[in-house]
Image (spheres, rainbow, N blue to C red):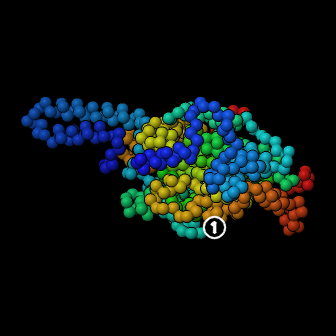
Amino acid sequence: MAAVRHVMEFERPIVELERQLEDLKRLDVSAQPELASEIAQLEAEIAMLKDALYSALTPWERVQVARHPERPKTQDYVGALFSEVVELRGDRAYGDDEAMFAGLGTIDGVRCVVLGHRKGKNTTENIRRNFGSPHPEGFRKARRAMLLAEKFGLPVVSFLDTAGAYPGIEAEERGQAWAIAECLETLAGLRTPVVVVGIGEGGSGGALAIGFGDRLIMLENAYYSVISPEMCSLILFKDPQHAAETASALRLTAVDLVELGIADEVIEEPLGGAHRDPALVLARVEDAIVRALRELASVPRDELVARRQARLASIGADSVRE
Amino acid sequence: MPVSDWFKAREQRRYTVVSPGAPSADLPDGVWLKCDGCKHTVYRGDLEANLSVCPHCGHHAEMPAKDRLLALADEGTFEETDATLSSTDPLRFTAAKPYAETLASAREKTGLAEAVVTGRALVGGHPAVLGAMDFRFIGASMGTVVGEKVARAFDRAREEERAVVFVTASGGARMQEGMLSLMQMAKTAAAVRRFSDAGLPYVAVLADPTYGGVTASFPVLADVIFAEPGAMVGFAGPKLVQETTRQSLPKGFQTAESLVEHGFVDAVVPRTELKATVARVLDYLCAQDVHPAAEGAACPVAFEEGS
């Protein structure tokens, strides 16, 4: 288990008990023999409480876990799961957006194009990477890499972790909507397998631009949503304080997405979240990607695209009344 | 008399105060409208005859989707499709207020089943599938029904070898249908791709306002993109951009005119010239007499009707 520094709001009661436990442990047990049983009791209580809390996270709590600063990030997955990595930079039109990773990498002996939103590990990195919120250049770089994948018959593996496309002046002036739409059109017809893994935040159009394909694998506490719970609350309640309620209403969790026919698989996280045992999560994600790539390898390209488009066409079809 | 009272008295002199429930026989009852652009009072009939464009200042007012399509189509050729498609509220969404109620009141207010109207028509003699979004219906947001109707429109046009002309106006994806709405961006983009691969022409007209997940999907994938004068078009709304960046927005930010300057829209076209302009583009892109060099090109256009 990794030492965790960032405490989420809903974890506070447990953290408080753990602090009390530490205090008790610092006392001299030999002087007060009854202390030992008290410590044991508190430890049992904490374990029970943790189990109860973490095994039944609400959607809003999962969103907070998905945003946890110590959660494994795109660069962790790329570094641990892929060998012979070559980063591809620049959109060949304006610049290079560090909020989007694009590169070549090998997993299970399969050469791939790898994409992913890239958040930073610290403030300096986050400022350079704009907290993982891409400008149009990021999406154009991703599209460039998709087309390269198609041209050379390499499958695409894409990691989702963004609060959303950056809502900035220059992002708008350089065609944010155009850049995203072009990614969608490209992915929709890309003649090579596309495997998508939701590892953290899946914020709206900025996630979708590299966020659909032939398989969508979601970490248990990753979310994927049309709008952030806070913004949804602001619009519907004129107040961001109802985010817990809108997080439930939006059906944005991994399990929800499987039920809605959008995601294919949920990867279980260790109790408390992926940041509690990154090595375990990395291994599970590797296994899921390898399985997906092996399954998709044998599908003829025409059929792959036809299936992808048929699946898209069917999304929401049940909720349309003639 | 204190100054505040003087202002109050002056206001009362200038305006007729009508108390609710009083006989209203003398009131004009919506015959006169105030233009949002120049604040001139305009006779409703004049405004409607001019496609809801103010005769004084040229301001383009919101327009019901069906009126837009009738204005684009050759007279008597518009035939609506999928008119009754409606949402079943797939998430049983309730936050602040049940989505089912929001849907019901939008249906009542507009007389429409959903926020987009589609159909077949001729435009300048060219067979086309037309679509227009109706902002009065939950901000013409795109949920499963809008996405389905847009996708069907492109698929139908592909099967029947028609051009597509789409007038957009929308606040974005419909949050009350959650991820099903977001996926409609991919679904409509896929439909455009299939259509486009068949070599058929697509003209989009961006009307005020077009934002969010709608802008970032099927509208901006058109072969030729026009926008209405003064239309606000973008991904993130201006308020969010301002709050996020804490910068003052440049003059003309996200207006149709600035989008032309930045290279994202082909031209700003006044509504009164829209039909003729779209028809002229289709004359080129649906041309029967293709250049010999283009023989065997993907565009399978050989239209008889209306020519």
Tell me the quarter of the picture where residue A54 sits.
top left
Can you give x and y, in whole percent of width and height, for residue B211 in the image? 60, 52
x, y percent for residue A85: 50, 63
Left or right of B75, for residue A79? left
Q: Chain of mark 1?
A: B
Residue found at x 30% / y 34%: A47
Q: Residue furthest left?
A: A31
With B240 as the anchor, is A302 left or right in this view?
A: right
Between B35 and A49, the one lying in front of the other is B35
Q: Residue at x 82, y 47 (%)?
A: B121
Picture coordinates of residue B300, whole percent (x, y): 85, 56
Q: Is residue A34 left or right of residue B298?
A: left
- Name the amino acid type tagged 1: Glu
Q: Quadrant of residue B107?
A: top right
Label 1's element?
helix
At 44% across and 53% down in the image, what residue appears? A73
Q: Residue furthest front?
A: B1
Q: Residue at x 76, y 56 (%)?
A: B272
Residue under circle 1?
B261
Residue A289 in view (yes/no): no
